[in-house]
Each structure stands twice: as C-alpha cells, then as structure tokens.
Amino acid sequence: MTGTADGAAEPIRGIVVMPEAFSDRVPSSSDRDDSDRERSVLLVSRDERVADSLRVGVSRVAGRVDRTDSAEDAVRVTRGLWYDAVLVDAGLGDEAFSVCESLREGPGGPAVVLYAERASLELATAAMRSGAFDLLSGEVGGDEFADRIGKALRESSTRRAAGEREARLKK
C-alpha cells in the first residue's frame, strides 16, 4: 500500500513509516558524530494504540520515527539502516527480549528500550539481562518519557563512537 491522503502510516517492506517524521535520507558515517543531526528511532509493536502513543512521545526527541510489528523485521532493518534507538513493546513477549539480545551483539548498536504498560521487578530484571538500556512503563509521565528516550539516544551515540574507535584500532 502506498501513502494515503489522510496521512496514515505507510507499510514499506515490513516497516511502517510515520509520514510526518520520515526522512528518506539515511545518515552517512560522517553524520554519526554530528550532535545536531536528526535522531531516528525504530518502534517495534503489533498494537496500533501502543505504537501511536509511543510515537507521540518519541517524536518529542527524535526527528524520524519508523515502525515495524515483528522482532525479526526489527533486527533485519537495524542491520541495514541507521537507528539511534529501538523502542520495543514488551507486549511482544519473548520476541521483545530476542530483539534486545540480538542488538546487543557487537559494538556500536542502537540502545534498546523496552516499553511495558505495567512494569514489574521481574520484567525489569529480564529486560536488563537481555541487554535493554532501559525499561519504561505506561506510568511514566511525558517529560520523563522524553528525557529517558533522550538518554538512550545519547547512549547510542556514545556506543557508536566507541565502536568506530575500536574498529579503527583494529586496522
């Protein structure tokens, strides 16, 4: 399906691009250290209501917000495109943790934040063990949500810079 006149999200090869935040330019490696560049976040959720709500919060701190509804697509897409952070709905169950585990492999990956409508100590422990940078719950207010996503974006930038330094040292 292509774009709609009412501005609805467009499915593109497993990714739903939020049209008002989409940029068709994938940043090059020379853009990576530029703190003024547009930040990008990939949302991973099957629930339209959750995805729409998260998009509103994320768009406060990221210029581009894309969405996919499967863990497999999220891992595949992050291998080929530049994302500063990945926000995963814990409603995906074990798939949510598989995204965290897959993306923590190797240096320089995006920071992964798990979102749950209701967080618990067990969920927080599982999230951290799987490699999530943070766990956000629906009980977090808008300002705190934006602040914590902003921290994940900064962490991702730090990780990528360290990964690039490591790669240069290995040469």
Image: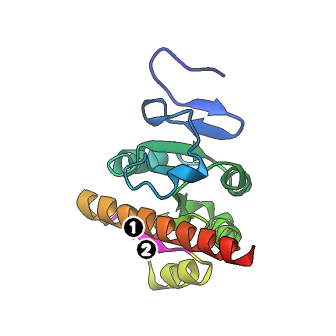
Disc 2 crowd rating (10 Å Cα; few below 14, some 14-19, many 20+) is some
Q: Is residue 18 above or below residue 31?
A: above
Location of residue 138 in the rendering, given as x and y in whole percent from the top left corner: 36, 62
At 39% from the left and 67% from the top, the residue drawn is 137
Residue 44 in the image: x percent, y percent?
58, 53
| Residue 8, position as x, y percentages in the image | 49, 26
Q: Amino acid at mark 2?
A: Ala
Q: Residue furthest top?
A: 5
Stretch in magenta: 132-139
Q: Name the foreground residue: 70 vs 64.
A: 64
Q: Do tag 2 and tag 1 residues touch (Cβ < 8 Å)?
A: yes
Q: Residues within 10 Å of mark 1 (few under 14, many from 20)?
A: some
First in sequence: mark 2 or mark 1?
Answer: 2
* Residue depicted at x 69% and y 40%: 14
**Is 67 drawn above or below residue 79 in the view shown?**
above
Which quarter of the rendered picture does the C terminus lie within? Answer: bottom right
Taking depth in this image into account, of 48 and 16 the one nearest to the observer is 16
Amino acid on which disc 1 is placed: Ser
The secondary structure type at the circle numbered 2 is: loop
Read off the residue under disc 2.
119
How many numbered marks have been drawn onto this rendered protein structure?
2
Tag 1 residue: 137
Label 2 vs label 1: CA separation? 5 Å
> In the drawing, does residue 78 fall left or right of residue 4?
right
Q: For residue 129, say whether it is visible.
A: yes
Residue 98: image quadrant is bottom right
- On residue 125, the disc is none
Q: Is residue 40 magenta?
A: no
Look at the image and tell me in which quarter the N terminus lies. Answer: top right
